[in-house]
Image (cartoon, grey):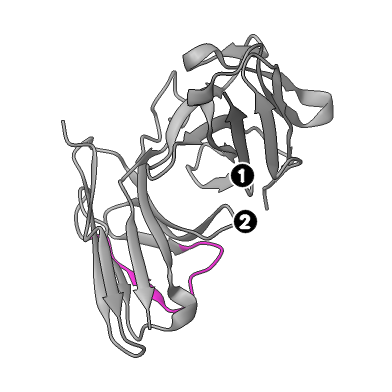
Amino acid sequence: AQSVSQHNHHVILSEAASLELGCNYSYGGTVNLFWYVQYPGQHLQLLLKYFSGDPLVKGIKGFEAEFIKSKFSFNLRKPSVQWSDTAEYFCAVNTNAGKSTFGDGTTLTVKP
Amino acid sequence: NAGVTQTPKFQVLKTGQSMTLQCAQDMNHEYMSWYRQDPGMGLRLIHYSVGAGITDQGEVPNGYNVSRSTTEDFPLRLLSAAPSQTSVYFCASLSLLGDRGHTGELFFGEGSRLTVL
């Protein structure tokens, strides 16, 4: 069975600070990796995804993530956060059978 | 293009009542699923389906039933509601061949907030 672990439950940053959210997964086969974002009161939306190829992937709003296969990690980064990045962030994995597993989520609060 | 549509958005039930959460998608996605979201617990998979006539249990299936008679619809039924089922429910779908043969990302509905008294 696949599982996802997010290390930070709540992160508080000031605007312009750099962000890194950790994500590790457990699964022995080929996985597809995702980061989703949920703004207050809204549903989840895709931030970025990795299937294969270049392990550094870029998403929307200046976010990027790096897949490190040897560490089973897919950490999310942003060089300079904005107040509008305040949201909950979820790491997820799925297999080519579609079944998706989510981490517990990280709440990011950005202070203006 | 409506995407994934869930109804109702809000519902209050009494313990023991039954209800159905509706979910429809217009993207011709093979895969549909239901999650519940509870504070500090992320999203937990209730049931999922890889095509019409095929359903399977997820991580927390007890107390819920599903069916998939068409590609578009995937209703979630609560047969006898319990307070432990108070949660926000999300329906989500994806294409199994979404991107260069890989499973695509999940598209979520707006969510249904259910309170069981």
What amino acid does circle 1 point to?
Gly
What amino acid does circle 2 point to?
Gly
**A28 magenta-colored:** no
Q: Position of residue A110 (x, y in %)?
A: 60, 28
Identify residue for label 1. A105
Q: Within the image, what quadrant is residue A64 found in?
A: top right
- Residue at position x 58%, y 47% from top? A101
Q: Which portion, as a residue range, is magenta?
A: B57-68
What's the distance in space between the residues labelled 1 and 2, CA to CA? 7 Å
Marked residue chain, label 2: B
Front residue of A18/A61: it is: A18
Q: Position of residue A81 (x, y in %)?
A: 60, 18
Q: Which mark is residue B40?
A: 2
Q: Are marks 1 and 2 in contact (CB under 8 Å)?
A: yes
Horizontal arrangement in the rendering, residue A52 relative to residue B112 (left or right): right
- Residue at position x 53%, y 60% from top? B38
Give the farthest residue toward the right.
Answer: A70
Q: Is disc 2 placed on a helix, strand or loop?
A: loop
